[in-house]
Image (spheres, rainbow, N blue to C red):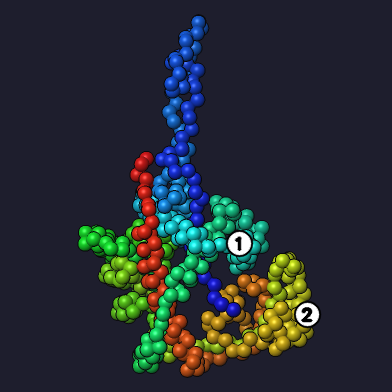
Amino acid sequence: MTRTLLVLALALCAVPAAAQFRAPTAPGSGVGSQWPGTAPAKPTPAPAPRAAPARGPVLIDRIVAIVNKDVITQRDLDERVALVVSQLKRQNTPLPPVEVLERQVLERMITDRVQVQFALETGVRIDDLQLDRTVAMIAEQNRMSLPDFRRALEREGVPFDRFREDIRREIMISRLKEREVDSKIQIGESEIDNFLQEVATTPKGAEYNIAHILVTVPESASPEQIEARLKRAQEAAARAKGGADFAQVAVSYSDAADALAGGGMGWRAQDRLPELFASVLAKMKPGEVSDVLRSPAGFHVLKLVDRRGGAAESAFVVEQTHPRHILVRINEVVSEGEARRKIGLLRQRIVDGANFAEIARLNSDDTASASRGGDLGWVVPGDLVPQFESAMKELKLDEVSQPVRTPFGLHLIQVLERRTADVSADRKRLEARKVLRERRSDEAYQEWVRQLRDRAYVELRLEER
């Protein structure tokens, strides 16, 4: 089993590249009303007709940006702005001026569109079956049936078909990132050796809850462009330090993928942060905002929301879990409804006293573990897919979970033991490689997206009201 990752973006449909879409004005009934290029109508005898009120062209939609051979319309932009506003209100984040929000949302849509175009051009496709399974998993994570989840979305003003396409785009961009960025990050053995030596001599364990603003700098930027971007970052830092709501400042200024969610990065372990961030955060107090930091991706401003840990705890002392499970796969032969009925009956038999291992041997579709009674051995965080790990962490010893949905199907999980232990030397090297890869991944992805955006043909028409 491997981790899954979804990265938020928006794929939009192509429409004809015209500056505006306007409905033609119908011929009026009054004297002098006419179609362009036709002779004026002759006046009719008494009684004299009343002149119809003058009607100008009615704006139906218009293009606000051209992205390569594709376009983004005002309607597309308005829909996305409405979603962002709804999200920010739920988070109690003060809204920036509407024109600022529109520009930020449009830039995010352009960046997303460029990635989706590249993904399609290079053969990344997400079929409907995979999409349906992912949407069903999201519904389950929200503890809803699929029909209830659909109704909940529509109550929030989110069309279900649009939501599905958003998820398709998320998966597509995630695949693209894995292929174009993550797979190309190389970690040398000497880097691992240096990292392990650093871990052995430096107390670790601190975790930081961080919010972040990124102001990107275009590839091959001129000195004037760099200076303008620096001033933008300095203005953002000054506003944040002056007491402005950091999330509102992030929405207004940040070019990062999480900007429209207020720039929150959540909890990050110290050793999984870029060295630039870790060295600055170590000297900050909760609530403080950093000065402007420079990296190859651009200019950064950090806010330390909170801190925890920090004792002399080894980065490789981890909580290990010993679980077992029963898997019922969902496929073209076994529908989700049938799988749920089957796994529900199996759980009831175990709760009534049947032996978990024997039920697993006879019924689990995970052939690798079924012969061992579903035993997965000792695992550490990151070994299993997030949905499985999340459910496993909530279980008490010997408790049998409710059915848990993952990309593999439906599971029953039971935790046999837990322990805290230092991982083996081989495992340490694997973990060190993963940590170093994570350190580089976000920055490498931002740099790759920046280059892709800079190579695209983009024509902005937002100001053409």
What is the x, y in percent for residue 117? Answer: 47, 57
Residue 403 image-quadrant placement: bottom right
Q: Secondary structure at mark 1?
A: loop
Instruction: Classify 10 Å Cα crowding around label 2: few (below 14), some (14-19), many (20 and above).
Output: some
Q: Is residue 333 visible?
A: yes
Report if the CB atoms under discs 2 and 1 are less than 8 Å apart. no
What is the x, y in percent for residue 407? Answer: 62, 71
Q: In the image shown, does 429 or 312 lie closer to the viewer?
A: 429
Q: Secondary structure at mark 2?
A: helix
Residue linked to disc 2: 349
Q: Is residue 192 above or below residue 44?
A: below
Give the residue drawn at x 67%, y 84%.
368
Q: In the displayed structure, does residue 383 sit left or right of residue 450? A: right
* Amino acid type for the residue under numbered disc 1: Asp
Residue 229 image-quadrant placement: bottom left
Residue 418 image-quadrant placement: bottom right
Q: Quadrant of the C terminus?
A: top left
Give the residue drawn at x 64%, y 71%.
405
Residue linked to disc 1: 127
Q: In the image shown, does 90 or 225 lie closer to the viewer?
A: 225
What is the x, y in percent for residue 245? Answer: 35, 62
Give the residue drawn at x 38%, y 56%.
456
Q: In the displayed structure, does residue 120 sit left or right of residue 218? A: right
Per the rendering, the mark at residue 355 is: none
What is the x, y in percent for residue 464? Answer: 36, 41
* Amino acid type for the residue under numbered disc 2: Arg
Q: In the image shown, does 306 or 167 lie closer to the viewer?
A: 167
Instruction: Classify 10 Å Cα crowding around label 1: few (below 14), some (14-19), many (20 and above).
Output: few
Give the residue drawn at x 64%, y 88%.
416
Q: Is residue 135 above or below residue 439?
A: above
